[in-house]
Image (cartoon, grey):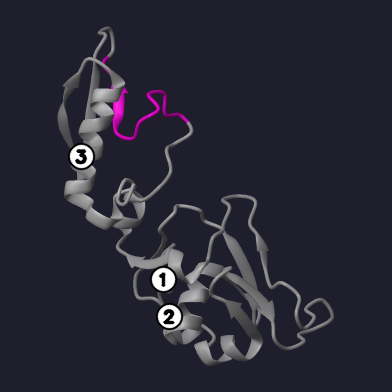
Amino acid sequence: MAGPKRTRDLVSPAVLRERLNYNCESGEFTWKSRIGGRCKVGNVAGNLRKSDGYRQVWIEGRLYLSHVVAWAWMTGEWPISEVDHRNTDKSDSRWSNLRLASHAQNQTNSKLYRNNTSGFRGVSKVKGRNLWVATIRIDNKPRKLGRFGTPDEAGAAYRAASIAHYGEYSPFAGA
Protein backbone atom coordinates (compact mmCIF):
# COMPACT_ATOMS: atom_id res chain seq x y z
CA MET A 1 0.00 0.00 0.00
CA ALA A 2 1.36 3.37 -0.97
CA GLY A 3 2.13 5.96 1.61
CA PRO A 4 -0.12 9.00 1.86
CA LYS A 5 0.24 11.54 -0.94
CA ARG A 6 -0.54 14.64 1.14
CA THR A 7 0.36 14.31 4.78
CA ARG A 8 -1.28 17.65 5.62
CA ASP A 9 -4.67 15.93 5.11
CA LEU A 10 -3.86 13.17 7.61
CA VAL A 11 -4.17 13.09 11.36
CA SER A 12 -0.87 13.60 13.10
CA PRO A 13 0.95 10.62 14.58
CA ALA A 14 0.47 12.33 17.96
CA VAL A 15 -3.31 12.09 17.50
CA LEU A 16 -2.92 8.40 16.59
CA ARG A 17 -1.13 7.83 19.90
CA GLU A 18 -3.85 9.76 21.78
CA ARG A 19 -6.65 7.68 20.25
CA LEU A 20 -5.04 4.23 19.92
CA ASN A 21 -2.85 1.76 21.74
CA TYR A 22 -0.66 -0.39 19.48
CA ASN A 23 0.70 -3.78 20.49
CA CYS A 24 3.77 -4.08 18.28
CA GLU A 25 4.10 -7.82 19.00
CA SER A 26 0.56 -8.72 17.93
CA GLY A 27 0.02 -5.85 15.46
CA GLU A 28 -3.33 -5.08 17.09
CA PHE A 29 -4.74 -1.64 17.75
CA THR A 30 -7.17 -0.96 20.60
CA TRP A 31 -9.05 2.20 21.44
CA LYS A 32 -7.38 4.33 24.09
CA SER A 33 -10.18 6.88 24.33
CA ARG A 34 -13.91 6.66 23.77
CA ILE A 35 -15.06 7.99 20.41
CA GLY A 36 -18.79 8.03 19.76
CA GLY A 37 -21.03 5.20 20.88
CA ARG A 38 -19.34 2.34 19.03
CA CYS A 39 -15.69 2.75 20.00
CA LYS A 40 -15.16 1.72 23.60
CA VAL A 41 -11.88 1.93 25.47
CA GLY A 42 -9.99 -1.36 25.19
CA ASN A 43 -11.96 -2.67 22.19
CA VAL A 44 -10.08 -3.76 19.08
CA ALA A 45 -9.92 -0.87 16.61
CA GLY A 46 -10.75 -1.50 12.98
CA ASN A 47 -11.69 -4.53 10.98
CA LEU A 48 -10.55 -6.82 8.19
CA ARG A 49 -11.41 -5.58 4.70
CA LYS A 50 -13.03 -8.52 2.90
CA SER A 51 -12.15 -7.30 -0.59
CA ASP A 52 -8.39 -7.70 -0.22
CA GLY A 53 -7.51 -8.87 3.31
CA TYR A 54 -6.01 -5.63 4.63
CA ARG A 55 -6.88 -4.44 8.15
CA GLN A 56 -8.33 -0.94 8.31
CA VAL A 57 -9.41 1.56 10.94
CA TRP A 58 -11.49 4.77 10.93
CA ILE A 59 -9.79 7.69 12.67
CA GLU A 60 -11.16 11.23 12.75
CA GLY A 61 -13.60 10.50 9.90
CA ARG A 62 -11.02 8.95 7.59
CA LEU A 63 -10.22 5.33 6.72
CA TYR A 64 -6.60 4.21 7.13
CA LEU A 65 -4.86 0.89 6.52
CA SER A 66 -3.59 -0.53 9.80
CA HIS A 67 -0.06 -1.31 8.62
CA VAL A 68 0.38 2.32 7.50
CA VAL A 69 -1.02 3.55 10.82
CA ALA A 70 1.40 1.22 12.62
CA TRP A 71 4.30 2.80 10.74
CA ALA A 72 3.18 6.33 11.65
CA TRP A 73 2.42 5.32 15.26
CA MET A 74 5.89 3.76 15.73
CA THR A 75 8.05 6.25 13.81
CA GLY A 76 6.14 9.47 14.37
CA GLU A 77 5.96 10.08 10.61
CA TRP A 78 3.70 8.96 7.79
CA PRO A 79 5.62 6.72 5.37
CA ILE A 80 7.03 8.34 2.24
CA SER A 81 6.91 5.07 0.28
CA GLU A 82 4.97 1.82 0.53
CA VAL A 83 4.85 -0.28 3.69
CA ASP A 84 5.55 -3.92 2.86
CA HIS A 85 4.51 -7.00 4.86
CA ARG A 86 7.61 -9.23 5.00
CA ASN A 87 5.53 -12.42 5.28
CA THR A 88 3.01 -11.32 2.58
CA ASP A 89 0.10 -11.55 5.07
CA LYS A 90 -1.81 -8.31 4.50
CA SER A 91 -3.55 -8.55 7.87
CA ASP A 92 -0.32 -8.99 9.88
CA SER A 93 0.62 -5.53 11.13
CA ARG A 94 3.22 -6.62 13.69
CA TRP A 95 6.07 -4.12 13.75
CA SER A 96 8.66 -6.84 13.02
CA ASN A 97 6.71 -7.72 9.85
CA LEU A 98 6.69 -4.18 8.38
CA ARG A 99 9.31 -2.37 6.31
CA LEU A 100 9.44 0.45 3.79
CA ALA A 101 9.64 -0.63 0.15
CA SER A 102 9.45 0.81 -3.31
CA HIS A 103 6.43 -0.23 -5.38
CA ALA A 104 8.57 -2.72 -7.34
CA GLN A 105 9.95 -4.26 -4.13
CA ASN A 106 6.46 -4.52 -2.66
CA GLN A 107 5.12 -6.22 -5.80
CA THR A 108 8.03 -8.67 -5.83
CA ASN A 109 7.23 -9.78 -2.30
CA SER A 110 3.71 -11.02 -3.03
CA LYS A 111 1.84 -14.30 -3.07
CA LEU A 112 1.33 -16.44 -6.17
CA TYR A 113 -1.55 -15.38 -8.37
CA ARG A 114 -4.66 -17.57 -8.23
CA ASN A 115 -4.39 -18.41 -11.92
CA ASN A 116 -0.82 -19.76 -11.59
CA THR A 117 -0.78 -23.27 -13.10
CA SER A 118 2.87 -24.24 -12.63
CA GLY A 119 2.94 -23.88 -8.85
CA PHE A 120 6.06 -21.72 -9.13
CA ARG A 121 6.53 -17.98 -9.34
CA GLY A 122 7.78 -16.82 -12.76
CA VAL A 123 7.28 -20.23 -14.42
CA SER A 124 4.98 -21.04 -17.34
CA LYS A 125 4.55 -23.88 -19.81
CA VAL A 126 5.70 -23.42 -23.41
CA LYS A 127 2.63 -23.96 -25.59
CA GLY A 128 2.69 -27.15 -27.61
CA ARG A 129 5.94 -28.37 -26.04
CA ASN A 130 6.83 -30.25 -22.93
CA LEU A 131 9.07 -27.39 -21.77
CA TRP A 132 8.85 -24.78 -19.05
CA VAL A 133 10.17 -21.23 -19.22
CA ALA A 134 11.32 -19.09 -16.29
CA THR A 135 10.93 -15.30 -16.58
CA ILE A 136 11.72 -12.58 -14.06
CA ARG A 137 10.77 -8.89 -14.25
CA ILE A 138 13.62 -6.46 -13.70
CA ASP A 139 12.94 -2.71 -14.06
CA ASN A 140 9.45 -3.65 -15.24
CA LYS A 141 10.84 -5.60 -18.20
CA PRO A 142 10.57 -9.39 -18.55
CA ARG A 143 13.91 -11.23 -18.69
CA LYS A 144 13.85 -14.86 -19.80
CA LEU A 145 16.00 -17.13 -17.68
CA GLY A 146 15.77 -20.10 -20.04
CA ARG A 147 13.73 -23.16 -20.96
CA PHE A 148 13.69 -26.20 -18.72
CA GLY A 149 12.46 -29.78 -18.84
CA THR A 150 10.47 -29.58 -15.59
CA PRO A 151 8.68 -26.87 -13.64
CA ASP A 152 10.97 -27.66 -10.68
CA GLU A 153 14.07 -26.76 -12.70
CA ALA A 154 12.49 -23.56 -14.00
CA GLY A 155 11.34 -22.69 -10.46
CA ALA A 156 14.88 -23.17 -9.12
CA ALA A 157 16.24 -20.82 -11.82
CA TYR A 158 13.65 -18.18 -10.94
CA ARG A 159 14.35 -18.56 -7.22
CA ALA A 160 18.10 -18.05 -7.71
CA ALA A 161 17.57 -15.00 -9.96
CA SER A 162 15.05 -13.52 -7.53
CA ILE A 163 17.40 -13.80 -4.57
CA ALA A 164 20.31 -12.41 -6.61
CA HIS A 165 18.35 -9.42 -7.92
CA TYR A 166 15.84 -8.56 -5.18
CA GLY A 167 17.84 -9.58 -2.10
CA GLU A 168 15.82 -9.24 1.11
CA TYR A 169 12.68 -8.33 -0.89
CA SER A 170 12.73 -11.64 -2.73
CA PRO A 171 9.91 -13.88 -1.53
CA PHE A 172 12.58 -16.56 -1.11
CA ALA A 173 14.95 -14.51 1.06
CA GLY A 174 15.65 -16.25 4.32
CA ALA A 175 13.81 -19.40 3.23
Q: Are marks 1 and 3 in contact (CB under 8 Å)?
A: no
Q: Are marks 1 and 2 in contact (CB under 8 Å)?
A: yes
Q: Which residue is mark 3?
A: 160
What is the three-letter code of the residue carrying label 1? Gly
Instruction: Note whether 157 is above or below 162 in the view shown.
Output: above
**How far across and how far down the image is residue 12, in percent?**
51, 89
- Can residue 48 be found in the magenta stretch? no
Amino acid type at mark 3:
Ala
In this figure, which residue is indicated by the disc labeled 1? 3
Residue drawn at point x = 39 percent, y = 76 percent: 79
Tell me if residue 108 comes above or below residue 23 in the rendering: above
**Residue at point 31% right, 45% down?**
172
Q: In which quadrant will I find the N terminus?
A: bottom left
Please indicate, yes or no, whether residue 139 appears anywhere in the rendered image.
no
- 126 horizontally vs 115: left or right: left
Q: Is residue 139 left or right of residue 56?
A: left
Q: Nearer the viewer, mark 1 or mark 3?
A: 3
Q: How many marks?
A: 3
The magenta span reads 115-126
The secondary structure type at the circle numbered 2 is loop
Residue 168 in view in this figure? yes
Q: Is residue 81 above or below residue 108?
A: below
Q: Which mark is residue 78?
A: 2
Residue 117 percent coordinates (x, y) = 41, 23
Crowd band around label 3 with a 10 angstrom C-alpha radius: few (<14), some (14–19), many (20+):
few
Which residue shows up at 78% across the image and 78% down it?
39
For marks 2 and 3, the one nearer the N-term is 2
Q: Is most of the magenta stretch helix, strand or loop?
A: loop
Rendering quarter of residue 154 = top left
